[in-house]
Image (cartoon, rainbow, N blue to C red):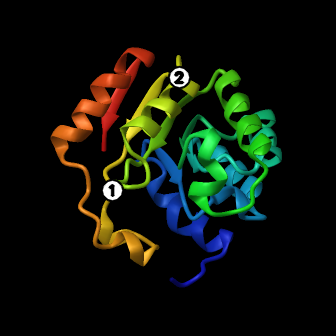
């Protein structure tokens, strides 16, 4: 994908901002971008509401965004239960950093959701339940459908995803823990 600088992006967005409810930044991981704060300030200047989709790996950036009131909504992807996080994501991350970010967002007073992607053989109902237990009381919990065609890991490209009925069963199991649950 061709890179576009912030000025060009704002130039493209500016005429549309009056027609859009807001702007959603996703990724990769948007908090990795060095000019994120400047971009969000510019979008705020034009009256945009802002949603950030994050993996909770950058608490210092999240703290800056919160302190500067640059985000209206966080959508946080939780790839695995805390107890299995490093093993499942296969990346050496300080799990305390992830937990810090999750708690920061939960205490922020901003609207937010946590997203989990059940994957047969990897994130089963037991893992979904463990994640839900960790996040009890969050406003929203979203089960994302796994699409094997979009898997970055070739081992999962032939995996049959959970059926709608199986996802609904998982949703119903965790629904009492949250104000709202959904499948996307």
Mark identifier at residue 28: none
From the image, tell me which residue sits under label 2. 138
Residue at screen point 33% across, 54% down: 120
From the image, tell me which residue sits under label 1. 146
Q: Residues within 10 Å of mark 1 (few under 14, many from 20)?
A: many
Residue at screen point 51% across, 50% down: 23
Q: Residues within 10 Å of mark 2 (few under 14, many from 20)?
A: some
Q: Is residue 128 left or right of residue 88?
A: left
Which of label 2 and label 1 is nearer to you? 1
Give above or below for 128 relative to 31: above
Residue 24: where, in percent of width, then height?
A: 51, 50
Q: Is residue 148 left or right of residue 13?
A: left
Q: What secondary structure is found at the residue carrying circle 1?
A: loop
Residue 127: where, in percent of width, then height?
A: 46, 39
- Whether residue 135 is visible to the viewer of this picture, yes or no, is no
Q: Quadrant of the C terminus?
A: top left
Q: Is residue 101 left or right of residue 145?
A: right
Residue at screen point 72% across, 36% down: 99
Q: What secondary structure is found at the residue carrying circle 2?
A: loop
Give above or below for 155 relative to 136: below
- Whether residue 115 is visible to the viewer of this picture, yes or no, is yes
Q: Is residue 105 left or right of residue 64?
A: left
Residue 161: where, in percent of width, then height?
A: 26, 56
Nearest the camera: 173 or 103?
173
Q: Residue furthest bottom?
A: 2
The residues tagged by marks 2 and 1 sit, at their Cα atoms, a distance apart of 22 Å
């Amino acid at each position: 994908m061709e890179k576009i600088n912030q000025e060009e992006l704002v130039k493209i967005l500016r005429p549309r901002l009056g027609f859009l409810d807001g702007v959603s930044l996703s990724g990769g991981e948007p908090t990795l971008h060095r000019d994120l704060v400047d971009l969000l300030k510019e979008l705020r200047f034009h009256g945009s509401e802002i949603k950030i989709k994050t993996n909770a790996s950058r608490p210092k950036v999240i703290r800056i965004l919160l302190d500067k009131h640059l985000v209206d909504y966080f959508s946080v992807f939780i790839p695995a239960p805390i107890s299995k996080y490093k093993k499942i994501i296969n990346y050496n991350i300080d799990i305390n950093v992830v937990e810090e970010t999750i708690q920061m967002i939960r205490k922020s007073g901003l609207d937010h959701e946590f997203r989990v992607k059940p994957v047969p053989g990897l994130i089963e109902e037991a893992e979904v339940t463990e994640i839900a237990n960790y996040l009890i009381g969050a406003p929203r919990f979203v089960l994302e459908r796994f699409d094997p065609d979009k898997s970055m890991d070739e081992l999962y490209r032939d995996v049959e995803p959970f059926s709608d009925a199986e996802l609904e069963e998982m949703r119903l199991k965790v629904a009492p823990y949250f104000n709202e649950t959904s499948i996307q």
